[in-house]
Structures are given as structure tokens and as C-alpha cells.
Amino acid sequence: MSSPFLEATALSCERDWRLLFENLDIRVDTGQMLQVSGPNGSGKTSLLRVLAGLRQPTSGQIRLKGQPLSSRNGDLASHLLWIGHAAGIKGLLSAEENLAWLCALHQPASRAQIWKALEAVGLRGFEDVPCNTLSAGQQRRVALARLYLDSPPLWILDEPFTALDKQAVSQLEAHLARHCQQGGLVVLTTHHTLSSLPAAYRDLDLGQHAA
Ligand SMILES: Nc1ncnc2c1ncn2[C@@H]1O[C@H](COP(=O)(O)OP(=O)(O)OP(=O)(O)O)[C@@H](O)[C@H]1O
């Protein structure tokens, strides 16, 4: 049997001497969406950062395609894309410049590809203005435009719907479901109730795993 794309076993996480969750087993296979839910402070962001290799778990193992995550440092960006709670874009750079350097981490994109992605997220005409002149929702859209470029299969997204208007929320939901249906994987946190779900959807409620 082939290894799951992402597998965590007996995962525990402590912050400031407080155990957030323990003994968590997670498996995410091709085509699946995993929504991590739970109350404020239950450890959703901490868990996603651990799964993305941005933070060490207190204990437990994470494997990506059968290999320990820590041994994948060199090629992590070709397997997973992380978009954090903050939009994570540089205010002095334009939307195009931000995307150009973010894409270079995985697969450099041409100007035409970047403009097409910006158009997909409703930012036509805003390609070359500094991002610090954009609204919060527009800045979020710049970050999310990466999902419309050639991207790695696993998307780990922390509160991706923050600051988006209703239409953008529906569009992103449909895009995430489509990504899974086409063989991608999504792990996300959101307090929002998703209305477009892929066939292989699961919810992990950290409130029930609180230590
Ligand atoms: N930078 C930090 N330094 C120390 N402790 C932190 C830090 N960030 C978070 N924590 C602690 O970890 C706990 C879990 O935080 P985390 O952000 O993972 O929760 P969350 O479930 O994502 O919350 P929310 O729904 O509010 O976004 C918090 O209660 C806090 O005590």
C-alpha cells in the first residue's frame, strides 16, 4: 500500500508550558480536504504550522509521502503551499512583484500567468500598485492568487476567507473543492461554515482533542 501524502502520528503540541493537544493522528490523502476546527486558542494555527514544517511538534512524527517532514526541507516548497493567517505580502511591492517572488519558491511564473491569476481573484487593474495601498480584502486576494498559479499539490491555509467579501468566499470555496476533485489536497482552518465541499471532506475538531 502506498504511503499517504501527509501523515502525522501521536502528535502533541505545547505552547508556553500548556499542552494544546496530544496523541493526534492525521492522515491526508490525494483528493482530500481536512478542515481543522475548534474554539479560539485550541491550537488550530499551531497545528497547521507544525504540519507545514514551520514549527516543531512537542512530540510525534510527520511524514510527507512516506519521508520525515524534517528531511524534506530542501524540496518542501514543491510539495506544499502555506498561506498563513496574515496575508504575508510585502506592502512596498506591487501585487505582481509579490507573486513573482512567492512563485519563485516553487515554480517561477511569467508576467502573463501572474496577471491571469490576479484577474481570477478580481484584481485586474491593480497589478502594479504597491500592496500597502490595497484594502485588507484585496491584499488577501493577492496572497490567494497563488492558488491560481502552478502550485504544489498540498495547500495548507490558515483562515483563508479572512476579509473576503461574500462573492470571493464562494469563489474560493469552489476553487478549493475543485482542487481536491482534481487530485490536490487541502488542509485549512476556518470559523466559516463551508458550503462547497469536495467528496472527500473531513473535519477535525480540536475542541474534542484538547489536552
Ligand atoms: N506566539 C505565541 N507565543 C506563545 N504562545 C502562543 C503564541 N501563539 C499562540 N500561543 C498560544 O497557543 C494557543 C493556541 O494558539 P493558536 O493560534 O494555535 O490557536 P487557534 O485555535 O488557531 O486560535 P484562533 O481560533 O483564535 O485563531 C493560544 O491559546 C496561546 O496561548
Image: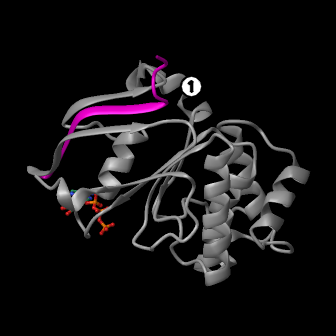
From the viewer's side, name the closer residue of 170 and 60: 170
In the rendered structure, the answer to whether residue 57 lies left or right of residue 14 reads right
From the viewer's side, name the closer residue of 51 and 24: 24
Residue 57 image offset from top left, x and y in percent: 25, 37
From the viewer's side, name the closer residue of 195 and 94: 195
Secondary structure of the residue carrying numbered label 1: helix
In the rendered structure, the answer to whether residue 95 lies left or right of residue 189 reads right
Q: Residue at x 67, y 54 (%)?
A: 178
Q: Residue at x 57, y 33 (%)?
A: 79
Q: Residue at x 68, y 78 (%)?
A: 133
Q: Is mark 1 within 8 Å of ligand 1?
A: no
In the rendered structure, the answer to whether residue 179 lies left or right of residue 18 reads right
Residue 197 image offset from top left, x and y in percent: 55, 61
Disc 1 residue type?
Asp
Q: Is residue 118 above or below residue 13?
A: below
Residue at the farthest front position? 199
Q: Main secondary structure of the magenta part?
A: strand
Q: Residues within 10 Å of mark 1 (few under 14, many from 20)?
A: few
In the rendered structure, the answer to whether residue 148 lies left or right of residue 152 reads right
Q: Quadrant of ligand 1?
A: bottom left
Q: How many marks?
A: 1
Q: Which residues are magenta?
A: 1-16
Residue 10 image offset from top left, x and y in percent: 21, 33
Q: Is residue 125 above or below residue 95?
A: below
Q: Is residue 57 above or below residue 130?
A: above
Q: Where is residue 105, by image quadrant?
A: top right
Pointer 1 residue: 75
Q: Is 15 included in the stretch rendered in magenta?
A: yes
Residue 32 image offset from top left, x and y in percent: 52, 45
